Image (cartoon, rainbow, N blue to C red):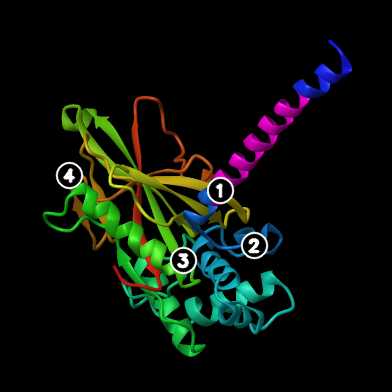
């Protein structure tokens, strides 16, 4: 091949490469614009393990990360807490809005226990905190399916609440609960559902709009157990029924059918129950949401 021919051949090849690069960049920009994503600096995320009194501080730590990643006034509120570092500020948050105030579910107890924080207690703490500090009001609600609600409408309702809160600069706090179904010899091998684990995370990103054909949607998360970013997929189960709690085992209600959206979150290790085997059916539910907009 002559030098002239070589140059002639290289020019179209270079143009093809540039065109492919431009298409890739445009696609990435389009994908970015299709999502609502808060800026997350992993170096500023709070790790629940810095609170050494209990291993169940995922709820209050998620409140801390919500404040740090939220609007400027929310992050300033976190910086105003007593303490020179995150560990001290987290302790201040727990002492003021959890340990010193009664539980909604069990008034004879405090909101914070060694095992963690219940759904309505975390919502109450967020309400009190936002009122005390003059921050945007945060509201909590169970994410159970409404009577007669189709899977499509159910999915769209939960997605809208997450997306609108993120759009307002307030990262929602999401409760995830896992359950195991096992056959019990004592029940003639009937399947019995039992509660397994409960964990709080913060949602930092979601697709802006659901397409009509979407069966679920992905979310970006901050897991307080380690203080790191991960992702999950939230979807409506359309084939197999399951049972899940609304509330506590003592005072709540077991719901049947397909009462919650399900979640695939392989990066959230706290949801893995001890002692589960391949025979067990495990589901993770999107259980409760604390956000700027009510459901």
Q: Nearer the viewer, mark 3 or mark 2?
A: 3
* Earlier-in-chain disc, 2 versus 1: 2
Spatial distance from mark 2 to mark 4, Cα to Cα? 37 Å
Residue name at image x 42 percent, y 33 percent: 276
Question: Is 28 inside the magenta-drawn segment?
Answer: yes
Spatial distance from mark 3 to mark 2, Cα to Cα? 17 Å
* Earlier-in-chain disc, 3 versus 1: 3
Q: Nearer the viewer, mark 3 or mark 1?
A: 3
Position of the N terminus by quadrant? top right
Q: Are marks 3 and 2 in contact (CB under 8 Å)?
A: no
Question: Is 76 inside the magenta-drawn segment?
Answer: no
Region rendered in magenta = 10-29
Find disc 4 in the rendering and name its residue.
257
Circle 4 SS class? loop
Residue 147 image position (x, y, % from top left): 12, 57
Q: Looking at this view, name the residue that lies furthest to the right.
A: 3
Name the dominant secondary structure of the magenta segment.
helix
Q: Looking at this view, name the residue that lies furthest to the front.
A: 4
- Quadrant location of residue 87? bottom right
Residue name at image x 81 percent, y 17 percent: 5
Find disc 1 in the rendering and name its residue.
230
* Earlier-in-chain disc, 4 versus 1: 1
| Image mark for residue 45 | 2
Q: Residues within 10 Å of mark 4 (few under 14, many from 20)?
A: few
Q: Residues within 10 Å of mark 3 (few under 14, many from 20)?
A: many
Q: Residues within 10 Å of mark 2 (few under 14, many from 20)?
A: many
Spatial distance from mark 2 to mark 1, Cα to Cα? 13 Å
Find disc 3 in the rendering and name its residue.
166
Residue name at image x 50 percent, y 71 percent: 169
């Amino acid at each position: 091949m002559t030098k002239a021919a070589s140059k002639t051949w290289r020019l179209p090849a270079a143009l093809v490469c540039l065109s492919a690069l431009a298409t890739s960049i445009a696609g990435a920009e389009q994908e970015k614009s299709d999502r609502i994503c808060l800026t997350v600096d992993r170096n500023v995320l709070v790790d629940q393990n810095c609170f050494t009194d209990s291993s169940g501080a995922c709820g209050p730590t998620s409140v801390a990360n919500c404040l740090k990643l939220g609007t400027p006034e929310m992050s300033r509120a976190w910086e105003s807490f007593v303490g020179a570092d995150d560990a001290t500020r987290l302790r201040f948050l727990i002492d003021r809005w959890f340990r010193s105030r009664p539980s909604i579910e069990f008034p004879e107890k405090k909101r914070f226990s060694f095992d963690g924080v219940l759904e309505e207690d975390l919502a109450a703490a967020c309400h009190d905190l936002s009122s005390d500090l003059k921050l945007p009001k945060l509201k909590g609600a169970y994410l159970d399916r409404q009577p007669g609600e189709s899977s499509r409408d159910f999915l769209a309702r939960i997605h809208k609440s997450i997306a609108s809160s993120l759009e307002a600069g307030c990262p929602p706090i999401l409760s995830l609960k896992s359950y195991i179904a096992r056959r019990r010899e004592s029940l003639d091998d009937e399947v019995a559902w039992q509660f397994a684990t409960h964990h709080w995370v913060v949602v930092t990103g979601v697709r802006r709009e659901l397409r009509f054909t979407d069966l679920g949607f992905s979310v970006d998360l901050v897991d307080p157990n380690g203080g790191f970013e991960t992702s999950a997929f939230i979807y409506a189960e359309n084939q197999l029924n399951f049972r899940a709690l609304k509330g506590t085992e003592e005072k709540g209600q077991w719901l049947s059918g397909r009462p919650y959206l399900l979640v695939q979150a392989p990066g959230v290790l706290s949801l893995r129950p001890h002692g589960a085997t391949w025979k067990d059916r495990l589901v993770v539910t999107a259980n409760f949401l604390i956000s700027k907009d009510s459901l």
